[in-house]
Amino acid sequence: MTVVPQADELERRLAEGERRGAALLGEVAKIPAFVRRDFLVALSYRAGFLTDIVGVVFGAFLFYFIGRLIDPASLPSVGGSQLTYFDYAAIGVALGPFLQIALSRVASVIRQEQLAGTLESLLVTPTAPATVQFGSVVYELIYIPIRTGLVLLVLALGFGLHYKASGIPVALAAGLLVVPFIWGLGLMSAASTLTYRRGGGAVDLLVGVLTLGSSAFFPLVLFPAWLTSIARVNPLYLGISSIRTALVTCGGWGPLAGRMALLAPMSVASLVLGLVAFRLALGRERRRGTLGLY
Amino acid sequence: MHPDDGRVVLAGRDGWTRALRSSVGVVPSGDRSFYLRISGLENLVFFGRLHGFSRRDAVARAGELLARVGLEESARVPVGVYSHGMQKRLSVARALLARPLLLLVDEATHDLDPEGSRRVRRLVEASAADGAAVLWTTQRVDEIRGFVNAVTLLNRGRVRFAGSVPRFMSYSPQQRFHLRLGLERTATAGEPLEALVAPALTGKGTLRAAEEGHAGHYLLALDDGVVLGDVLASLTALGVAVLTCTEEKSEIEEAFFALTADAGT
């Protein structure tokens, strides 16, 4: 039954294959396919979307009522402004799920594909592994910021946040700076998942420690002095405190330049380390032929 | 998987390049290689996009292939609702998306019923007729008969045989056939039939009753190099009517056992 095509036909088809899979542009063109796939899958879980939103609203209520118990005078001022606890924690309430989902989702993309049995089918296509990885999180990267923005809007309208719209550009910039850091962690965790099959536990622990020292829910001054000093270089602290300061004071770039200068190289380093770890883990699994096992 | 040793050459090119991958179709053995929450059409379009098709081309190609594998009516149904056989046909359709030069089929029929297996084999045969080279791996060795033109038997990581199907079958140590014989023209006078025909079968094979309670059923074992027709002619000459003759065990399976016996399987 084996039939070997004629040589010129082979060349023609290979050239066609090369043309279709052409380099970077070809890879970029595949990203919308991943977004559509994940959108359709998400759409098939309508109840999941609703419970997600309801969960966030309940979380906001929790912090709102806790905030009423806390005397604003006990909180440190931010850029000279005195905040209520809810003003202080709202960034954490909105960004907390963002960090959790972004980290866990990046880490679990490969595992989910493994569990679904689709990973090998993806990797035998002429698609770069990095495209598979990136494409599989793009939908979340689009959905989560929209969700975060909606949450902040609901909090502002429903609970009376005292943020300034003019601070949004600087807050967005600070948010964009911290995202590569989170991605890097996610990729390292994905590498761990590929290699050890169970990488989630380590990620949860790391996210827990980083969130604890991020000033998302309480000021760092509550820590012992030595721990406060360490926490002040926590990239999540640098990102969250910058966003908060930008939204509260609208003081422009100047007051945040130091924090952002510190955050930028750590974000780059995290992303590079994550990419290297992921490529090494992927290469190892492909050599061993165990990529599809879980 | 990266090779420990050796090279894979396709169309004179080696290395698992993107262009080569775009020319290879794979039907995996697993039964969960699709996104079960979305339709067969959307699955094919997605994988088509990963092969570099524009969305419009991917939709057109997916529709064409769904019709070819007989799934056009289920195109918009979530794959999770598909039967096992339907998922396997969808898998073949996906492998054909990029009109592959080489089709790798990994145990595609191991868990299908005979009808489902035949449909998958016909789809793959049609692809071969279109010019694809097919590498079909299977543990259901019997299905290679009349289906493939070259066999490679791998056992414990070693090639035990490489060649044609008839040559492969020649490794079957002894051919055994199940015969149903009529005795109306034979005056046996109470003598067992096998004793009656034994002198005529000397050097050709042996005949013995198959099982008690099945009158007229016998097992014929041919000696090496003996042609079945000669033995049947001898029986007929003795007045024995050969009503049916079927192979008792698969020669292919017997050949498999013979070739792998020394490996301890």
Image (spheres, coloured by chain):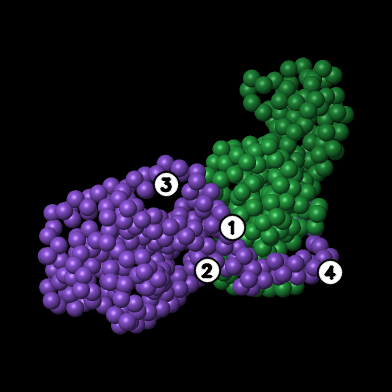
Chain colours: A purple, B green
| Residue A53 picture location, percent across and down | 37, 48
Q: What type is the residue that disc 3 sits on? A: Phe
Q: Chain of mark 1?
A: A
Callouts 4 and 3 close, C-beta under 8 Å: no
On residue A33, which mark appears?
1
Q: Looking at the picture, how far across and down is residue B42, in whole percent?
A: 61, 49
Left or right of A24, for residue A174: left
Which of the two labelled residues, at mark 3 and mark 2, occupies the earlier sequence position? 3
Neighbour tally class for label 2: few under 14, some 14-19, many 20 plus, Cα within 10 Å: some
Do marks 2 and 4 share a subunit? yes
Q: Residue at x 53, y 48 (%)?
A: A40
Residue type for callout 4:
Asp
Q: Nearer the viewer, mark 4 or mark 3?
A: 3
Q: Do tag 2 and tag 1 residues touch (Cβ < 8 Å)? A: no
SS at circle 1:
helix
Of circles 3 and 2, the one toward us is: 3
Q: Are marks 1 and 4 on the same chain?
A: yes
Chain containing the residue with disc 2: A
Q: Is residue B7 visible?
A: no
Nearer the camera: disc 1 or disc 4: 1
In primary-sequence order, the first of circles 1 and 4 is 4
Give the distance between the C-alpha atoms of the residues marked 1 and 3, in whole angstroms: 21 Å
- Reading the image, the residue beneath label 4 is A8
Identify the residue under disc 2: A130
Circles 1, 4 touching at the beta carbon (< 8 Å): no
**How many numbered marks appear?**
4
Q: Quick check: B247 left or right of A161?
A: right
Q: Is residue A234 left or right of residue B265?
A: left
Q: Amino acid at mark 2?
A: Ala
Q: CA distance from mark 4 to mark 3?
A: 52 Å
